[in-house]
Amino acid sequence: MKVYSNYTLLIGALALVLFLLTRNNGEIFSRVRKGKLQQDNLDMNFGKESTRHLSQQSQISKNELPYFILHVGPQKTGTTSIQSLLDSEQFKRILQKDNYVFIGSGIGKNKGVLDNSKPIYHWDSNHNLELSSDLVQKVKQLRQSRTNVVASSEYLGTMQECWRELLFPEDTDRQWNVQIIVTYRRLFSYLPSDWNQQYKVYRINNEGRPKLPRHHDWPGINGDYEIQSFKDWFATKHYQGGKKEPEHLAKRNYDSWTKLSDKAKVRIVSLYEKGGLVENFVCKAMVGAKHACNTYKSSSSNTSTEMDAVRLLKANESINLDHDILAVYAYQKGLVNKKFTRVQVVDAVELHVQSLEEEGIQYVQSCLNNDMTRFLRRWSLEYEEWALQKLPGEIEFINDLTDFNNDWQSVLNSNKLCSIDAGKTLAMQPWKDFFATHFN
């Protein structure tokens, strides 16, 4: 009985050990398995989280609005440089890689986007200004294909209601990510260029009478007229005894287009930003146009594009108006026989100017007086500070006027604020002899 009891106790002890081992192993296995499941669950959750993020990214990409980049000038602020690049065939192909389409530069009254022979605006039966049906249809097609659009015109200074109807139609979801671009040029640099632009061609305001590349008739004949000196033009149009605030078209355009929609962004691109106007337009204003930006920055790939640009820029370059001013003054003083045309005399004056310059003889110029000069600098500085406040990341340069002052001094030194003094020039003996010899 004692042996049996010991044997029984031994078996019981072994059973207890096995039970404890089994229970511990089960707990260990359970803990390991539970940990694995927890890790699996973590991995599965991570996968779900990753999938959710990817799904969100796809959804964002799918719902991302295409850009509508509308450059609204104003004129004489590098618009031709921008348009000539965007309109070149090589650059159009590059824009396609960025899903961009340039729909033309002629967006203005009597200018066409898709067809330059058609006006882009027209009046409906209720005398409301409307965009052409061609443009509206084209924009809708590009929106349907989710294509980014870039357009440029210096004739869009004032925001018209029809643009709001096109870009932000009522009772519909938002259609575009609209970016309005206004280019900025300093007032003291802009005004001489504006004066030249106004007078370098013969412009008639009457409908149906086109502008001519130059003035062909003497003042009073066929509606032609006398070109004002820069000083007289500035005094009449912008100065008025120092009592008038000279309008800066960049600010006018900016203020007008901010009324388009609170969903639209109006931006300033400056001629003076690092990189230059065109580079900043392509690389900053045209959001996401990486191929276009890199191509423009690459000097090795710009040859054919630059050739197209040069061709268009030459058609818009300034001309010397002093020769015409002197020719007309001499005609009005009776020093030119009426058998000679205005063009003939102007061309002869230009050649004689070149001949006298070779001899070191310059004609007399008339510049803005001191009060006018101070007035122009003060207002140029006011607009400079306004523009800098609108430029992203440029606020810190508001108090740094080094570049502004250097540019101002350069304009003064190059006599950009001057034009010929016809009376004093004609009193010079070389010019008396010239008209007496050639045009009596």
Image: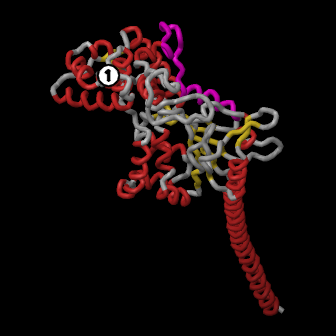
Q: State the image coordinates of residue 345 (x, y, percent, origin top left).
A: 33, 28
- Quadrant of image for the C terminus: top left
- Quadrant of image for the N terminus: bottom right
User: For residue 259: magenta?
Assistant: yes
- Left or right: 177 as drawn, with respect to 183: right
Q: State the image coordinates of residue 51 (x, y, percent, origin top left).
A: 70, 64
Q: In the figure, 61 relative to 240: above or below?
A: below
Which residue does the image show at 34% across and 18% down from the upper left?
330
Q: In the figure, 144 relative to 251: above or below?
A: below
User: For residue 102: magenta?
Assistant: no
> Badge 1 is on which residue?
415
Q: Magenta: predominant secondary structure element?
A: helix
- The residue tagged with tag 1: helix, strand or loop? loop
Q: In which quarter of the image is residue 373?
A: top left
Which residue does the image show at 28% across and 16% down from the upper left?
426
Is residue 311 visible from the viewing direction of this image? yes
Residue 273 versus residue 254: which sits nearer the camera? 254
Give the residues drawn in magenta, as a range. Answer: 236-260
Q: Please identify the residue farthest to the left as the structure is shown.
A: 359
Q: Alpha-carbon neighbours of circle 1 within 10 Å: few (<14), some, or many (≥20)?
A: few
Which residue does the image show at 52% across and 8% down from the upper left?
243
Residue 438 versus residue 416: which sits nearer the camera? 438
Task: Identify the amino acid type marked 1.
Answer: Asn
Which residue does the image show at 17% across and 30% down from the upper left?
358
